[in-house]
Amino acid sequence: MKNNIDKRTLFAETPAPKALMTLAIPTIISQMINLIYNMVDAFFIGRTGNSYMMAATTVTLTMVMMNVALSNLFGIGGGSLVARRMGAGAPKEARQVSAFSVYAATALALVYSALIGLFLDPILRFLGASEATIDYARSYALIVIVLGSLPSILSLTLAHLLRNAGFSSQASAGLSMGGILNCALDPLFMFVLLPRGQEVTGAAIATALSNLLGCVYLIWAYARATREAPMSFSLREALALDRGNRRALFAVGVPSAILTGLFDLANICVNIIAAAHNDLVLAGMGIVMKVERVPNAVNIGICQGMLPIVAFNFASGNHRRMKEVMRTARFSGLVISFICMIFFEIFADKAAGAFLSTSAGDTATAVATVGYAALFLRIRCLASPVQFINYSTSYSMQAMGNGKGTLLHAFVRELVFYIPLMFLLDRLFGEVGLAAALPVGEACGAAFALWLMNRWLKAHSVEGEGGEFY
């Protein structure tokens, strides 16, 4: 009971900056460690100086990121609903929602693994794999996706549920464990246990094993949390979830999953267009898509820390506090975005060079790949501030149960602005235009997101203050 009181105090009464820091800092740490965990494969593969191995990891990145999209369906959809039911004083419904989310995520992961296994080679070809890269891509996908999606998706779902119930530290510890283990296991499997030429397979084994061990910890942490918070592993409670709560879960979870899925679709289009130039352009773009995730990881951590507080206070009717938390998160994210943007403009060559050795393997192709990566990074990093506006607005709408607005924003951002712009600008300006499509598309998406948010807040007048977001 004491823990529940503490969580309610954190959500409802603790000063906004302190409450946000309490939930966001562990989340940012886990995001950064999880980022390292996702980047470490590329980093160690880059030590070989093999641009084709790097290109193969770029091809499979969208498949790995699809795990995130699928986990958002029941992680963010269920987690946001758990926080709202807690705020509304309905612990029984919160337990049912959490249990349903766990079992549904498990079933979804198994279906995804089976589908990828059945159609692996055609999918890899579609994603841009060439004759020079498909063997590497196939070995990685078989282990990390076909065999490893279940622990990956379940881990992310459990972490979202824990975080939204106020157990941010436990969620962060589980995700961080996987990242730390991967950093240790990657060089062991890549350079010690497996023979030369099998570095991609070694990286895949290390990643899958790290995911599994992290998942075991999160299951244990979740089981302990059920003693103190309205969460459950009970299949009976999962099946008891009524239609109204299922609809509310999917109203937020589906748009969140689609949002991330559309982001993956955009990355697929980037890969296809980049591969049409050559494998080195693809490898260079792959390096940048990893480097630029540093500010993204921090900003997503801020948004995920913000989400349960916004959801709780929206449900409890404390709209003044809700808006204060949103403003605090917005300011923090924009400051970080601008700092990272300036850093990448100055140190693009060094940041790109950290991911691919130019003194091992085929040095000529490695130097060309790093050159492409540095050029793309200087262009694409300009998107960081407006990307945060997109993230924070989307998470705020999810927290308030505005699934339709989140879904509309996702479709317009990716399908109306970004993806058409990448094809258009690539046709007009080549690979430079492809890189420029991100900041242009994100800026258009951010303007649309702010319009949606203002409209939503005005329709739900906040204590007579109106709904202006800025």
Image: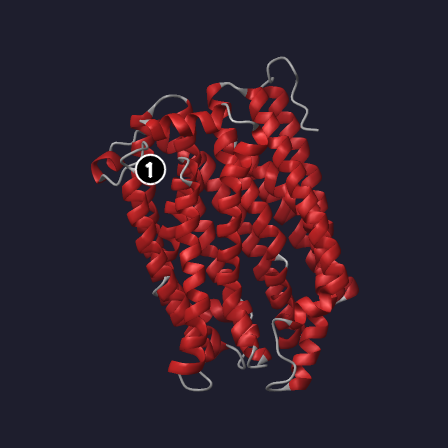
Q: Is residue 404 visible?
A: no
Name of the residue lying farthest toward the right? 429
Which residue is at a point 54% across and 55% down the rendered structure image? 264
Q: Quadrant of the C terminus?
A: top right
Is residue 169 left or right of 458 when viewed as pictured? left
Q: How is the image coloured?
A: secondary structure
Q: Is residue 22 visible?
A: yes
Residue nearest the observer in this picture, 144 or 224:
224
At mark 1, the secondary structure is: helix
Q: Quadrant of the N terminus?
A: top left
Reading the image, the residue beneath label 1 is 98
Q: Position of residue 138 (x, y in %)?
A: 44, 74
| Callout 1 crowding tier (Cα within 10 Å): few <14, some 14–19, many ≥20 | many
Residue nearest the observer in this picture, 333 or 119:
333
Amino acid carrying label 1: it is Ser
Quadrant in which residue 364 is drawn: bottom right
Quadrant in which residue 451 is drawn: top right
Quadrant in which residue 97 is drawn: top left
Name of the residue lying farthest toward the left? 236
Residue nearest the observer in this picture, 27 or 389:
27
Is residue 89 left or right of 414 when viewed as pictured? left
Placement of 207 over or under 342, stated as above or below: below
Placement of 228 over or under 38, stated as above or below: above
Placement of 414 over or under 94, stated as above or below: below
Which residue is at a point 72% across and 57% down the rendered structure image? 343
Q: Position of residue 437 (x, y in %)?
A: 71, 56
Which residue is at a point 39% across and 32% down the rendered structure image? 82
